[in-house]
Image (tube, rainbow, N blue to C red):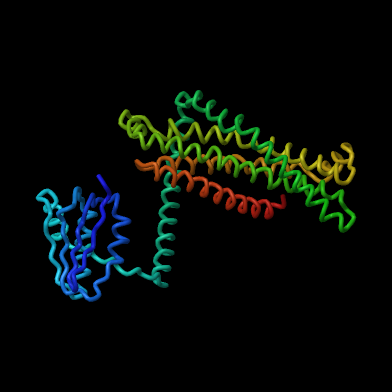
Amino acid sequence: MKPGWFEETRDGDRLVLAAVGAWTIDAAGPLDAALRRLSADGLSAARIDLGGIEALDTAGAWLLVRTGRVLAEAGVEVTIGGAAPRHAQIFDRVVEVGPPPPLPPARRATAVDAVARLGKQVVDAVRQGRDLLAFFGAVVVTALRVLVHPGRIRFVSFVHHLEQAGLNALPIVGLVAFLIGVVVAYQGVDQFRRFGVQIFTVNLLGISVLRELGILITAILVAGRSGSAYTAQIGTMQVNEEVDAMRTLGLDPIELLVLPRILALIVALPLLTFFADIMAVFGGGVMSMMLIDLTVPRFLRQLQEAVGLWTFWVGIIKAPVFAFLIGMVGCFEGLRVRGSAESLGQLTTRSVVESIFLVIVFDALFSILFSRLGI
């Protein structure tokens, strides 16, 4: 069956348009372009002959109906006929439905719309904070109940998540920490060289890594790695209605799914932070020795003079708090997934963003606290 086409015959001020072939959506593009080039200049009457049409669908019928209306609007008397009975029904239905309604004009954004969006975001943030605080309370109550009955602790699940969040994260944490140490040392030497005190690069490296960079980099990596995994795992269980099945059986999802993950992170993150501190100091030490010809004993002696015991503990103390925040947010967002892959993707992304945001906020609060305590 040949694609649709038409034959145009003019007799003075009269036009005969004979449609031939298959007038279907497959041929709609070329037919639309050809019909738009049709001119009504000098015409008083036109006939659209449908007798040669071999196949017709609504797209082809609409092109013919539109052509007739365009000619009629130009003052041409239009007649349409000759359709086979099986095509006449489609054609008559398209005529009956009429042209599609015009698209509404695009609405321009105004200052009121911007304020409304801002207000909605503020309300959503307040609700999110309220729900997260309620979830925090539920986790604490469940944890206290499990402490009263230690036999309810799921050690197998705890060990599994400890391996996933801790042991399996060592390569990426170590690599990133090593490179961070290299960058800090390189930049420190470059700046201190101006004053002839390149040896203070060791001080900069030890204090910045042990107090801030080690725990921050590790927490951000864990949030992107383990926090997102918690949301995806629990969210998938929500989509598959496994969490609802647990509740139906009288099981507490917080006790079964949330607590083992949070406890695993609380144990894993301090250990990962310690490992990251070692790798960052090692990377910075290697770079320092390469740039300023520093020996290993001199590097260790300068590091010991610059770094006190509390410098090390400041970073380690933050780790369990950051671990709790990351685990809680990851599980919280996972339990909020509602039945679609789109929801799962959105909340997984949100859990990472919220975790990193809370880590930064609490890091700032820790900095203020330690400053007030003179640590």
From the viewer's side, name the closer residue of 177 and 7. 7
Task: State how many labels appear.
Answer: 0
Q: Position of 278 compared to 193: left or right?
A: left
Q: Position of 123 compared to 326: left or right?
A: left
In the image, is residue 161 above or below residue 273? above
From the viewer's side, name the closer residue of 141 and 91. 91
From the viewer's side, name the closer residue of 4 and 290. 4
Image spot of residue 372 (x, y percent): 67, 55
* Residue found farthest to the left: 85
Does residue 162 appear in the picture of this structure?
Answer: yes
Quarter of image, res 64 = bottom left
Q: Position of 201 compared to 228: left or right?
A: right
Image spot of residue 155 (x, y percent): 51, 24
User: In the image, what residue occupies the spot 24% across and 72% down?
Assistant: 40
User: In the image, what residue occupies the spot 87% across and 40% down?
Assistant: 301
User: In the image, what residue occupies the spot 50% across and 23% down?
Assistant: 156
Image spot of residue 114 (x, y percent): 42, 68
Does residue 137 appear in the picture of this structure?
Answer: no
Image spot of residue 14 (x, y percent): 17, 70
In the image, is residue 249 above or below residue 43? above
In the image, is residue 85 above or below residue 248? below
Q: Position of 216 compared to 83: left or right?
A: right
State the quadrant of the N terminus: top left
